[in-house]
Image (cartoon, rainbow, N blue to C red):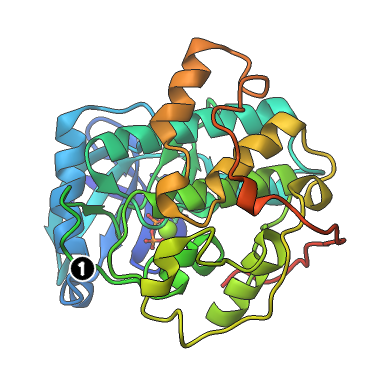
Amino acid sequence: MDQYCILGRIGEGAHGIVFKAKHVETGEIVALKKVALRRLEDGIPNQALREIKALQEIEDNQHVVQLKAVFPHGAGFVLAFEFMLSDLAEVVRHAQRPLVQAQVKSYLQMLLKGVAFCHANNIVHRDLKPANLLISASGQLKIADFGLARVFSPDGSRLYTHQVATRWYRAPELLYGARQYDQGVDLWAVGCILGELLNGSPLFPGENDIEQLCCVLRILGTPSPQVWPEITELPDYNKISFKEQAPVPLEEVLPDASPQALDLLGQFLLYPPRQRISASQVWNEVSMTKELWRRARLEPHDAASAPRTVKCWKPLPMKHP
Ligand code: ADP
Ligand code: MG
């Protein structure tokens, strides 16, 4: 820690305080994240550290924030990351109006590239949201905060906690208490982030866990076993019942978004996790053609989830949970 000179406090999240600092010898500016030891007892960071290290060693990815060093400090430890100027939450907050299509597309491409890389390495981030997507001085988006990330066993036999992901970005299977889940939870979050970029405010701003499901249902309709057969096996399926609601067409929810962007959004925001389009699938399409919004229709939609009635929906600006 002596090799750094602290320049100021940048942020404080659920897992630590972040400082801007300068390396005394090299002059390099970094972000230092201090993680308290008591958090280690929760069992998250220890695991996460190994995984982040693995992630950094496998390949230096352009769209994953670079971890430069890890060292013990006091009763905890410190992670030194490359310094990033801002984050996507701040970009959205300071935008005068919803971002233009070209900006949305550019951020989405970078996000997808980072997510595809993580998923290819069996790493599920589990807390994707605008505040965890950092933006460099040159406008590069990089995924940060792997405090909840896990390496997933491909056989899917292990059980995991459903208490992950910030509520507004939490996939429906987690809201129904799923203990077995996969990359799908990140793909749902990508859909929420895309929706937020198109909308200028969060798509599903639930104030508590039940209301979170209500927000999702209000737009996507009540999930039925016909559309999502596995729902009946989820721990909380029988504990919560909602009245039948039909889905609202996404063009009603986001009237200013292009049909192509909405089509892609619809492929992330699907109830059955396995039906969500994968990051690499979209990314491959994007890299083959520069015209993402023209080539977004990759697979036909499930006819069962087609909208039945049209309702007006207006997002409510609410405080972040
Ligand atoms: P937490 O798990 O506590 O949410 P994060 O890693 O998300 O921790 O860091 C909290 C905040 O600190 C971020 O939202 C961001 O504003 C800031 N931050 C984190 N890493 C960096 C970085 N590499 N460069 C600049 N700011 C950062
Ligand atoms: Mg964070």
Which of the 4 image quarters holds residue 114?
top left
**Residue with the most extreme bottom position:** 239
Tally of numbered tags: 1
Q: Is residue 73 above or below residue 113?
A: below
Q: Position of residue 231 (x, y in %)?
A: 44, 68
Front one among 85 and 312: 312
Report whether 153 appears left or right of 228. left
Q: Does 150 sit left or right of 22 as displayed? A: left
For residue 93, side relative to residue 231 (left or right) = right
> Residue sitting at 62 percent across and 28 percent down?
105
* Residue 37: image location, x then y, percent: 18, 72
Q: Position of residue 123 (x, y in %)?
A: 25, 46
| 86 in relation to 42, above or below | above
- Of the residues shown, which amino acid type is indicated by label 1? Leu
How crowded pointer 1 is (Cα within 10 Å; few <14, some 14-19, many 20+) is rated as few
Query: Mark 1: which secondary structure?
Result: loop
Give the residue drawn at x 45%, y 79%. 237
Q: State whether residue 183 appears in this view.
A: yes
Cβ at disc 1 under 8 Å from ligand 1: no
Query: Where is residue 149 shown, x and y percent of the image?
Result: 28, 55
Q: Is residue 91 above or below residue 245?
A: above
> Height in image: 305 above or below 108?
below
Q: Which residue is mark 1?
A: 159
**Quadrant of the image containing the C terminus:** bottom right
Image quadrant assignment for residue 290:
top right
Residue at position x 84%, y 44% from top?
255
Residue 243 vs residue 316, the one in the foreground: 243
Please tell me which residue lies in front, 271 or 21: 271
Look at 61% across and 20% down and name the residue there. Answer: 295
Is residue 7 something one can see in this rendering?
A: no
